[in-house]
Image (spheres, helix red, strand yellow):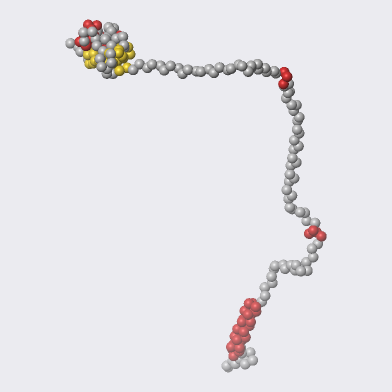
Amino acid sequence: MELKKNPNVDYKGKYVLFFNIGLVLSLLLVITAFEWESISTESVVDLDNYTITDELLLLPNTRHEPPPKPKPKQITLIEVPDDKEIDVDEVAFSFDIANDDVIEEVAFAPPPDEEVEIVHEMVETMPSFDGGIREFYKFVAENLKYPAQARRIGIEGKVFVQFIIDKDGSLSDIKVVRGIGGGCDEEVLRIVNMSPRWNPGKQRGVPVKVRMMLPISFKLK
């Protein structure tokens, strides 16, 4: 026996209709969701109708006033007594100058120029030793003692001695210009200080000071 459905309860024939109705409802829900206005959580204050109450007027003033300026100190003037005045009568000056008195002018003469003696290097007549320069070296050879230190070390050479022959023929300012050491320099100074007088040098016939320099040799035999 074949079963047959009641056409009133057969929903397969109405499937397309239900699908279209569902699609339309879905679209309506989506459109409604986009168009729905969200409720704002912000509170809006109407300033036009807002009334300032007395509580707002009683708020303390937070502005800081500048500190008061310090009062200037008063300067107290202390009176100082004036110095004691000197009576003019206590100090008396008297000048007794007659009309005939004349003050003599004191003239100061300039000090005399000190005569500076010139020591010549070359003159018309050079100083000389009695008997010539050979006699002077003979005098040196007879009195010279070869220093033991120089002999032991073997020092040889020439000592150059310089001296001034004064106007009277005496020797002064004796010094060694170039020495060799070993006691030879001191020996030369000793011998020259023992030297007899020389004949002074002359310039235009007048005795003058002349500086001379002579070598004295030391040689071991």
> In the shown orientation, is residue 56 left or right of residue 130?
right
Query: Which of 68 and 25 lies nearest the eye of the viewer?
Result: 68
User: Which residue is found at the position 75% from the left and 67% from the top?
Assistant: 47
Question: In which image quadrant can residue 55 be found?
Answer: bottom right
User: Which residue is found at the position 65% from the left and 17% from the top?
Assistant: 95
Above/below status of 59 relative to 170: below
Q: Given the current orientation, which residue lies at the most extreme left position?
A: 221
Let me know if residue 164 appears in the view.
no
User: Which residue is found at the position 61% from the left and 16% from the top?
Assistant: 100
Query: Which of 70 and 22 lies nearest the eye of the viewer?
Result: 70
> Where residue 101 appears, x then y in whole percent?
60, 16
Question: In which image quadrant can residue 149 be found?
Answer: top left
> Where residue 107 appears, x then y in whole percent?
51, 18
Above/below status of 20 relative to 151: below
Tell me the quadrant of the picture where the N terminus can be found: bottom right
> Where residue 164 appears, x then y in whole percent?
30, 14
> In the shown orientation, is residue 104 left or right of residue 52?
left
Query: Which of 166 and 92 lies nearest the eye of the viewer?
Result: 92
Above/below status of 202 relative to 30: above
Question: In which image quadrant can residue 148 be found?
Answer: top left
> In the shown orientation, is residue 168 left or right of residue 88?
left
Query: Which of 99 and 33 lies nearest the eye of the viewer?
Result: 99
Q: Given the current orientation, which residue lies at the most extreme right position?
A: 54
Let me know if residue 81 appears in the view.
yes
Tell me the quadrant of the picture where the C terminus can be found: top left
> Where residue 174 appears, x then y in whole percent?
31, 13
Above/below status of 70 relative to 135: below
